[in-house]
Image (spheres, rainbow, N blue to C red):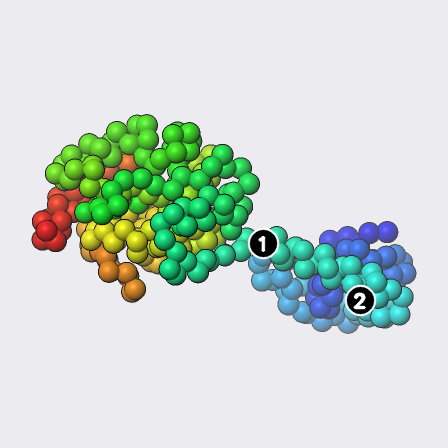
Amino acid sequence: MAVNQQQLDYLSAMGIPVWISRDLPMPDLFKEQALGSDLGLSERRLPVELKGEATATTLSEAGLRAADELIKDLQQTTPIKQIAELAASLDDAIESKPQIISQNLDGVDWIELEKAVSQCTACDLHEKRQHTVFGYGSQRPSLMIVGDIPRLSDEQQNQPFTGETGELLSNMLSHLDVNADAVYFANLLKCRTPLDNSPQSNQAASCLSYLKQQIKLLQPPLILLLGRSTAQQVLGQDLPMVKLRQRVHELEGLDVRFIASYHPAYLLKQPRLKSLVWKDLQFIKQVLTNNG
Ligand code: SF4
């Protein structure tokens, strides 16, 4: 007989992991007695985590005895091999959790970096990509523009900022008097996300080392970070765009300045924000002039 949720709660209160108790036979005491029933026995309260919320549950002596019974059952009858298999299945579950794999790319040159990205399997996004989108543009840029993710048309054309998003970005750049030939375009992530969702933090963190190496090799004086998730991940600041924009940011170990603004893909959905971006462009222009 399988152990049901109520019984699992008791087991959990007794410190018996669910991963063990789900796969073990039901001890006799559980079969015969309704746990927590009104047997007229004294009760104790123990803290239990239920459905992610800290709560308290009332345990009867019968329930506690039943849990003791299960512990004895575990100790006496569960073959070591079965416990080892269960422990291994727990290890598998832990390993399948999203992990952050940061790369040591010190000394890696441009060609090696591009190859490393094309072969990367550091996060789950490699499974469904057609290919990676590394970036394109000037190798000595006066401005680097970094978005969040390659979208479908970007992947198809193997470059960031294609389609309507790219057109809007070109319009924005024309206000800056920056020649597109003097710009390098890249994304924080080099692989598409399903449905063009914002990157998950483990995906962004795993991919960030590639972007940082691109920055080290290109040495742009100024980087425009487009989109909240891009700015938050690159700058390591969990702030809304309203607090990230209109400021110059710096990062330890990188001789470059950063400015954040809204992503053109977002502007296409929220055109009313264009007036804010107009102000951001004026700010960027001023910083570029002072750099210049
Ligand atoms: Fe690797 Fe980045 Fe692609 Fe993830 S998104 S697989 S870290 S290249």
Q: Residue at x 55, y 53 (%)?
A: 98
Local crowd size for mark 1, using a 10 Å CA cut-off: few (<14), some (14–19), many (≥20): few
Q: In the image, is 278 to the left or to the right of 70?
A: left
Please state the horizontal and vertical placement of residue 44, each as a whole percent of the image.
Answer: 71, 71
Q: How many marks?
A: 2
Q: Residue at x 67, y 63 (%)?
A: 57
Amino acid carrying label 2: it is Ala
Q: Please tell me whether mark 2 sits on a helix, a strand or a loop.
A: helix
Above-or-below relation of 282 to 3 = above
**Of the two numbered discs 1 and 2 in the rendering, the one whose residue sits closer to the viewer:** 1
Q: Nearer the viewer, residue 144 or 44?
A: 144
Would the CB of label 2 be found within 8 Å of ligand 1?
A: no
Please state the horizontal and vertical placement of residue 30, each as a whole percent of the image.
Answer: 85, 59
Q: In the image, is 124 to the left or to the right of 17?
A: left
Distance from disc 1 to disc 2, alpha carbons, whole Å, reads: 30 Å
Q: Is residue 25 visible?
A: yes
In terms of image quadrants, where is residue 95?
bottom right
Q: Nearer the viewer, residue 30 or 133?
A: 133
Local crowd size for mark 2, using a 10 Å CA cut-off: few (<14), some (14–19), many (≥20): many
Above-or-below relation of 134 to 247 = above
Amino acid carrying label 1: it is Lys
Q: Please tell me whether mark 1 sits on a helix, a strand or a loop.
A: loop
Please state the horizontal and vertical placement of residue 14, each as a whole percent of the image.
Answer: 73, 68
Q: Which residue is mark 1?
A: 97
Q: Residue at x 58, y 62 (%)?
A: 54
Q: Which residue is mark 2?
A: 67
Please state the horizontal and vertical placement of residue 237, each as a whole percent of the image.
Answer: 33, 58
Above-or-below relation of 11 to 144 = below
Q: Residue at x 44, y 60 (%)?
A: 104
Q: Is residue 36 visible?
A: no
Q: Which disc, if any, is residue 71? A: none
